[in-house]
Image: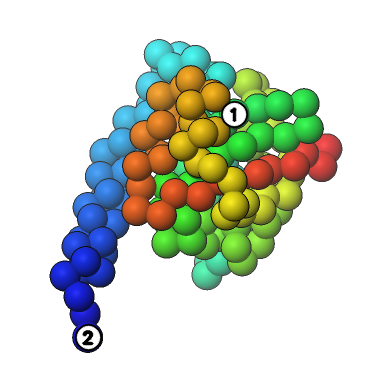
Amino acid sequence: MDTGHTRAARRQFRVFRAVGRYLLNPTVRGLARLGAVRPTQVSELETLGRKTGQLRRVPVSPIFDESGAWVICGHGTLSGWGANIEANPNVRIQQGNRWRAGIASFVPDDDVRARVRLSGAAGPKIASYGTAPVSVRIDFTD
């Protein structure tokens, strides 16, 4: 039996996904290309499509460190790029003008809200309000 809670969660996810896919992602991507957003705030994450095998790019707000990056996946494996990572963890992420290769992994026991507070950035904060936020660790391989 479908409870009202699960129906509401599915509806929330569909709305978030549509707004992100058709409004926010294209806007953020365009602003980043115009230079209106600093490269340290927004990067592109490249995954391999799990169904098509084509490269897929999505704007993300990473938190970089010496050996990799942290990204908040607001909808976990429900999101397209989250499901792509689950199918193939080999990714590339843009760090400034450079593309870095890495291996992505979900870190479900990481405290997403604490990580967002430490970063102080707006992008991860927005992602943390998704339907199933989870931290993704990208360890650089290049």
To which residue does mark 1 refer?
63
Residue shown at 36%/34% (left/top)? 126
Quarter of the image with the N terminus is bottom left
Within 10 Å of disc 1 (Cα), the crowding (few <14, some 14-19, many 20+) is many
- Horizontally, residue 140 falls left or right of residue 73, namely right
> Residue 75: horizontal and vertical position, in percent?
41, 53
Q: Give the CA separation, mark 1 to mark 2.
A: 40 Å
Disc 2 secondary structure class? loop
Residue shown at 34%/53% (left/top)? 131
The answer to whether the residues at label 1 and label 2 have Cβ atoms under 8 Å apart is no
- Horizontally, residue 57 falls left or right of residue 67, namely left
Looking at the image, which residue sits at the far right? 142
* Disc 1 versus disc 2: nearer the observer: 2
To which residue does mark 2 refer?
1
Check disc 1 and give the amino acid type.
Ile
Closer to us: 114 or 7: 114
Check disc 2 and give the amino acid type.
Met
